[in-house]
Amino acid sequence: MLPSSDPYRVLNVPRDAKRHEIRAAYRTLAWQWHPDHGGAPGQMIEINEAWRILGHEDRRAAYDAAARRPAVAARQPAGPQSKAAPEAERPVQAARVPGVIDYGRYAGWSIDELAIHDPDYLQWLVRMPAGRQYATRIREIFDRNDRQAAERAPKPAPRRGMFGMRTAAAR
């Protein structure tokens, strides 16, 4: 499936650019448009999607091959038989799965997996606009982890005075 905008245009690189040129363009734009530096979250999502496609040779080749193919609708004659494309030619859209990240470097990871692998990322994500949809689940995980840590914490030993006797605070 082709993205809504051309990743080459988003990153402002020619179609025959080398990977290191694409990476340099991505990093420059990411620095400029990242929300932590005052940029727009929507623009950053578009830049990340372009990098996701062009940053990997196999995805880039698949994108280039799909972009070279003529549109299916242009090949079909107009008329009552072409109202809907056959099922095999319709673009497949991935269904959103609740609790699974669908963008960025952890695309396809569940919130539970991230809590184990990279809890710092979840602490960052819960503060970002893009992470609002996951905020409730992230807070549940952190609350559960806090309760479990409190249960595992050792109980303090009773305080003893100078002669081995319990102090008033320990009684």
Image (tube, grey):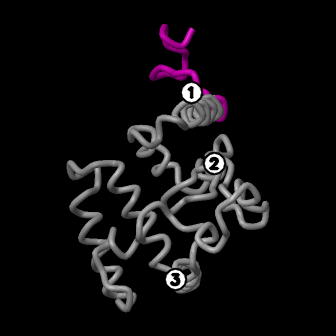
The answer to if 153 sits in the magenta stretch is yes
Indicate which disc, 3 or 1, sits on the residue closer to the N terminus: 3
| Between marks 3 and 1 in the image, the one whose residue lies nearer the viewer | 3
* Residues tagged 1 and 2 counted as in contact (Cβ below 8 A): no
Cα separation between marks 3 and 1: 64 Å
Q: Residue at x 21, y 52 (%)?
A: 37
* Residue under pointer 1: 156
Residue 149 seen = no
Q: Residue at x 54, y 68 (%)?
A: 2
Say left or right for 101 vs 23: right
Image location (x, y in percent) of residue 80:
73, 55
- The N terminus: image quadrant: bottom right
* Residue under pointer 2: 100
Magenta stretch mostly in which secondary structure?
loop
Image location (x, y in percent) of residue 54:
45, 78
Q: Residue at x 49, y 73 (%)?
A: 53
* Residue under pointer 3: 64
Cα separation between marks 3 and 2: 28 Å
Image location (x, y in percent) of residue 154:
62, 33
Query: Which image quadrant for residue 33?
Result: bottom left
Amino acid type of the residue tagged 2 in the rendering:
Val
Q: Residue at x 62, y 28 (%)?
A: 147
Amino acid type of the residue tagged 3 in the rendering:
Asp
Cα separation between marks 1 and 2: 40 Å
